[in-house]
Image (cartoon, grey):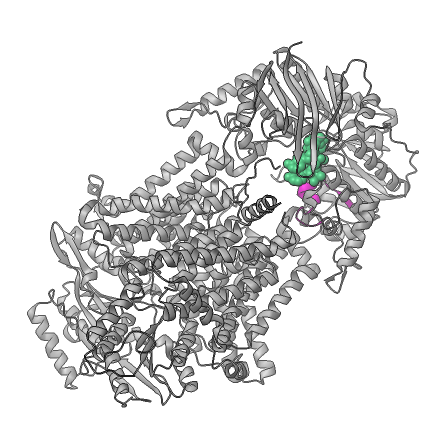
Amino acid sequence: ACGSDDSEDTSTDSNAGGTEEESDFTVSMVTDTGGIDDKSFNQSAWEGMQAFGEENGLEEGVDGFKYFQSNNDADYVTNINTAARNDFDLVFGIGFLLTEAIEQVAAQQTDTNFAIVDSVAEGDNVASITFKEHEGSFLVGVAAGLTTESDKIGFVGGVESDLINKFAAGFKAGVEAVNPDAEIDIQFAGDFNNASRGQQMAAAMYGSGADVIYHAAGGTGNGVFTEAKNLKQQDPDRQVWVIGVDRDQAAEGALEADGEELNVTLTSMVKRVDIAVQDVSKQAMDGEFPGGEVIEYGIEEDGISIAETQDNLSQEILDEIESYQQQILDGEIEVPSTLE
Amino acid sequence: MFNRAQTILIPVISVALGLLIGAVVMIVSGYNPIDGYGALLKGSLGETFYIGETIRQITPYIFAGLAVAFAFRTGLFNIGVEGQLLVGWIASVWVGLAFDLPKIIHLPMAIAAGAIAGALWAFIPGILKARLRVHEVIVTIMMNYIALHLVNYLVRYVISDEQNTTDRVPESASLKSPFFEALTEFSTMHYGIFIALAGAIIYFIILEKTSTGFELRSVGFNQNASEYAGMNVNRNIVLSMVISGAFAGLGGAMEGLGTFGYGFIHGAFSGVGFDGIAVALLGGNVAIGVVLAAALFGILKQGALIMPLESGVPTELVEIVIAIIIFFVASSYIIAYLLQRFKKGAQ
Amino acid sequence: MDILSAIEILVKSMLFASAPLIFTALGGVFSERSGVVNIGLEGLMVIGAFAAVVFNITFASALGASTPWVALLVAMGIGGLFSLIHAVASISFRADHVVSGVAINFLALGLGVYLVKAWYGAGQTDKIPEPLYYQKIPLLYDIPVIGPILFNNYVTSYLAIIVAFIAWFVLFKTPFGLRLRSVGEHPLAADTMGINVYKMRYIAVVISGVLGGLGGGVYAQTITQDFSGSTITGQGFIALAAVIFGKWHPIGAMGAALFFGLAQSLAIIGSSFPLLADVPNWILLSAPYVLTILALAGFIGRADAPKAIGTSYIKGKR
Amino acid sequence: MDYVIEMLNIRKEFPGIVANDNITLQLKKGEIHALLGENGAGKSTLMNVLFGLYQPEKGEIRVKGQKVNITSPNIANELGIGMVHQHFMLVDTFTVTENIVLGSEPKKGLSIDMKKAEKEVQEISDRYGLSVDPKAKIADISVGMQQRAEILKTLYRGAEILIFDEPTAVLTPQEIKELIQIFKTLIAEGKSIILITHKLKEIIAVCDRVTVIRKGVGIDTLDVEGATPTQLASLMVGREVLFTTEKTTAVPKDVVLEISGLNVKDSRGVAAVRNLDLTVRSGEILGIAGVDGNGQSELIEAITGLRKISSGSIKLNGKKLSALKTRKITEAGVGHIPQDRHKHGLVLDFPIGDNMVLQTYYQRPYSKMSMLNNKEINKQAKKLIKEFDVRTPSEYTQARALSGGNQQKAIIGREIDRDPDLLIAAQPTRGLDVGAIEFIHQRLIDQRDKGKAVLLLSFELEEIMNVSDKIAVIYEGNIIATVDPKKTSEQELGLLMAGSKKKEAGEKKDV
Ligand SMILES: Nc1ncnc2c1ncn2[C@@H]1O[C@H](COP(=O)(O)OP(=O)(O)OP(=O)(O)O)[C@@H](O)[C@H]1O
Ligand SMILES: Nc1ncnc2c1ncn2[C@@H]1O[C@H](COP(=O)(O)OP(=O)(O)OP(=O)(O)O)[C@@H](O)[C@H]1O
Ligand SMILES: [Mg+2]
Ligand SMILES: [Mg+2]
């Protein structure tokens, strides 16, 4: 979305939709080093912002909505500050890595509103947006627990952190809820960009009998898909599944074997950063900015869900998931958010 | 081989050529180079805020450049600046958090901790090279990865209570400068730049003005002759790595105590250490050169952040420009040759 | 996990993780044996990965199953072309080889990502439609016990090992190899023997580009299956380490790359052993790097680089 | 007259200097033609032109009457011209055979036919009496064998005309004898030879004609028959040259260096110095004569602390040196002019000024409290440059840019100026012209006359005989005889050096 073509696209789009009422509200976001096309939460956030812009007749740019790309950890403060200085009414920091930076700038730029995604930051002009990843992970855990035939399930995390632990904890609880016999092997790659290690880890897990792996490891997760697809390609009848993360990762699992279209993506745990971004932007535009508050997006708030692509899940499993989802909504199940 | 005028002229020409070719790349891919460079300039030097940010960027580049350059001058190739920087960073933060002391003691202590940690991290490849002749390039590359994993572990399990970041270092150990922040409209500029400039001066003095530097350079050029002259070659190899690592560690301390003020879990390398190789080489491995090269890097990298905002040009353009500048500086022979040709032609 | 399947996993992981490193390291061996330092291996891998992925995405529908192989050829070609920059700078323009190599690294990454953004409007490409898959090698796979352990992997992994032996043959058994090495040891002597020093070095650097491009292409088409700025993150430097670790010898470099792949998979397998369960994760994650250092430190006899490495040959100068 | 080579009016310029100015050299078939001139006169340049390494600005080259254009060594090879360079052109890590066949390798299929190559090398070496081990690595063989490998390289390519650029500078007397024998075989085979050497006696002994050049200009070509060394020398230098170094009789006094029961191992761990005893007194020059490889290098390295000793003791003025580090030994009063000036003597990338204080940079006045005092350093450098006539643009010039002779003068100046009680001079005049040699010899004698002890190591008997007050012959790591130079002859010494102990020369072993 960096290219000139793109910005033209968006501008014509918003011109086309120019029938909507004009607003002088401006909003921007600062990515972490993943960038706006990380196929993960940065991208999702940007999609949300674009949708918000379109809906409200904003143009991409300083007078509408805009993203700032961070190339380095040291760029966070700079970018957030630059955004504030360019008079954006609301500035999102995407990713927990930006927490400190948001806090710091928010304390200085008191006229601007800020929001942090995936973390909690202090400040009256800061809204903290977190997700109940553990809830969604619980649901895919249910899918995994019911799908596994070997009773061995893997989890590949990127770098160990509170956030990634939330995924692991919810997942584990989900599996245990439906399949107490299943073993869960939780591993961390120590890296979000090491596909090679991801593939090695997946090879070790599948090789020792696991048949479902849930990854929360960014680019390292690429390797998990690669290994699964390889195994599936060699033996289309073999049971190998990957559960995607953050967005619907069905495309990542597609392959062709013996002329047959297959897919190793069992399902994905979807985190709707886009919805959260739109939501908070709307509130801010309407003068109801939730400054100082922590907004948790879970299943209830449509912030967390299981992916739309569910072709690989049987109806029974879908029903089970549905029922657990209801129990979570009803508060009958309290999903743990830390590994203990 | 080159005269004085050329040593100044060649980098200038290289930078001009780099920018020129960058402009061509922009035109070819449908951007307006004037807008692009305008944005770059504005985003690095156009406002006091950006100037502050640029200066802050330059700070670690100076140290990383000095670290690589120091090793180079003494015949060693330190690709491990990245790792040494990380351990220096975390060590300085650790000391910053662990003690409660008056600033006059605490800050120097935290900075020293960064230098010492970097030095220790570089001591390992140094001693392996000196004692066992293990190639420092391999060891320093490997030590980078080890540092990354170790530091992440320390942040999470030792310095913090299973958090993603450590606490902020207290004021007594902080390089943050409310004065500069106010002056530059809340940029992250901190006092580190002065330490970096002091570092460059110290670099110059150690290497060019002390008898230790004499030895280090001598060993760098010719180990046999140095041994003949009674110098302890192995000791100098270790010392060189240690000083190089100390510079890198100081770079880390600038980040830990200044730019950030805390330590955090790194998903990947920051790249500053690798950029340091380019800074050092661009600066001809001399102190003033390193400072100037770091300034160029800082300006380009900082400006690159604003470029997409103002002109739509992808930030990567800057990497291309940097690459071309490095290429031409490296090929200074041909530039000097052409210059001579040109001069002759004119006469 | 029983021992046999543990070994199977180890070997498998080692083979696929090492293959890109082997190709690239072999490229490094050629270049450095001719006297040209090549710290640009990282950049050559980047450009190879970029070329292979873009080609794969663009031509998959037209070429079908042969796409990845043609893409590898393209990656080799582009890698070779790209390395010409390094060659021109370090051989003809007498540039410091390290500086020029650093420029290659910057340029490859910058250009790769810049073009991806320009062409696809995103910082990373889609998944390639036609990746490479594991293959059971006919006949060999049927050997009891060993077959399934050794002969079920990417064809490129075997290719890497074969290329290592070919490289050894070329460098140490053929006139071309003798000349190439002579140019790296004593270019003036080679010149007096009527060997064109510049030509040999150009060829060697281009070979390193071809093999580096191949390494990157293999990495992208077997492991990541897409391209972004973080596809190649340090593999080229590990390959450089393998060149030195392997004492500038093709078989040595291959061994070093395999060793590294093995150490990595050992650490991963290790973490599932109860014995190591309490070892902090960072130690296991660091294990491959620590093991490499230990292996080096334990090695008896140090490696001597080609004598003329890093020096520009200037005709008519003594 | 049929000349095989004619170089007519050759002019070759380098930036700022005319290395060859209108030089003519004609080589008859079957002759050994000497090319004589001071350091830097332009001999190597002229030969490199002939070999195709340099292109002349002017002039004409004819091979067997045919005008040719030699643009690369390849063409020279094709024309049957081979060159044995001043600095060997051998790849250390290759075998003798690999070096010889490089560039024209016999092939079997795709690979080199090493068997065939080795056989061919063996054949040629047998034919010309050039004994080499075809399979040995260059790094592992003696300088003499390396040179034979160089000669084989040219013969393998069928060279008819052989150029030797200072081939004897690095050889021991025995090896020189062998080389002269080889020359004769080559001539008998119908080859022609151009020989560059600074040793006038060699010219008289083996050459037919000689061409003398001075500062890039051809002076004369004359028949060797009837010519005397003095005549040749003055032609070359342009003034009278004295040959015997003027010196008074030595008055040895106190013992300065005392070595007893010394054992040292070489790099491979083999005993190189065995149970060696040696004494050097103040006011005398002790020359060590011996064939290369008999422990000389190890002995010097042991004295200077560069090599660990296995047992025995080394004392300087009664103080034990053997446990000390090089620096302490230097400080105790040992000066060392090393054998290999590029490897040990100088940091070539340093300016001459810094090289002048290579061992003393940390002492006053060059350093105060660890800070260098560049003013003092350069002052010292200027002084030495002047005193020792080092030809350099300035003290800031990189040592690399100086000619070999001037580099050597710089080292000698540095070592002598420290006024060491013991000065070790290892091959101090290797590769230098007569003028420079004279200068250096005089300096060594001056040291002696100042009451210092000098230990001179040389493979050149003439130098040893002329300069030393006493000669110790080293053989297989041991001093097997000590003789008075006035009472011995080169023949006698040669025999001793070859290990024949039958002679208890002029004096008894007095050590
Ligand atoms: N490559 C070069 N570049 C510049 N000048 C050179 C070069 N080679 C030689 N010269 C110059 O040419 C002159 C002749 O050098 P040359 O090596 O031919 O002398 P030489 O007679 O062989 O001396 P020596 O007896 O010491 O070997 C030198 O004085 C030097 O100034
Ligand atoms: N490449 C070069 N460029 C410029 N000057 C050179 C070059 N090579 C040699 N010279 C000059 O040539 C002169 C003589 O050099 P040369 O190496 O021939 O000396 P030399 O006395 O023959 O030494 P050696 O004993 O090593 O043969 C020196 O003054 C040196 O400055
Ligand atoms: Mg010479
Ligand atoms: Mg010469």
- In the displayed structure, would residue A232 be above or below residue D108? below
What is the count of numbered marks? 0
In the picture, residue A229 is in which quadrant?
A: bottom left
Span of residues in magenta: D335-351
Q: Among all residues in the image, which is located at the extreme left?
A: A315
Q: Is residue A61 left or right of residue B216?
A: left
Q: Nearer the viewer, residue D322 or B69?
A: B69
* Residue C251 on the magenta span: no
Q: Is residue D297 visible?
A: no
Nearest to the observer: residue C209 or residue A28: A28
Q: Is residue B71 above or below residue B57?
A: above
Compare residues D19 and A181 and report the one nearer the observer.
D19
Q: Quadrant of ligand 1?
A: top right
Residue B241 falls in image quadrant: bottom right
Q: Position of residue D209 (x, y in %)?
A: 73, 16
- The quarter of the picture where the C terminus of chain B appears is top right
Give percent across and percent down for residue C171: 43, 35
Left or right: B65 with respect to A262?
A: right
Estimate the x, y position of residue B205 in percent, counting from the top left: 67, 64
Q: Can you say whether C30 is above or below A262 in the image? A: above
In the displayed structure, does residue C280 sit left or right of residue C125? right
Q: Place residue C283 in its image quadrant.
A: bottom left
Residue found at the far top of this picture: D1
At 45% across and 75% down in the image, what residue appears? B263
Closer-to-camera residue (D324/C29): C29
The percent position of residue C202, horizontal first and vertical second, equals 45, 39
| Residue occupying the point 59% across, 22% down | D82
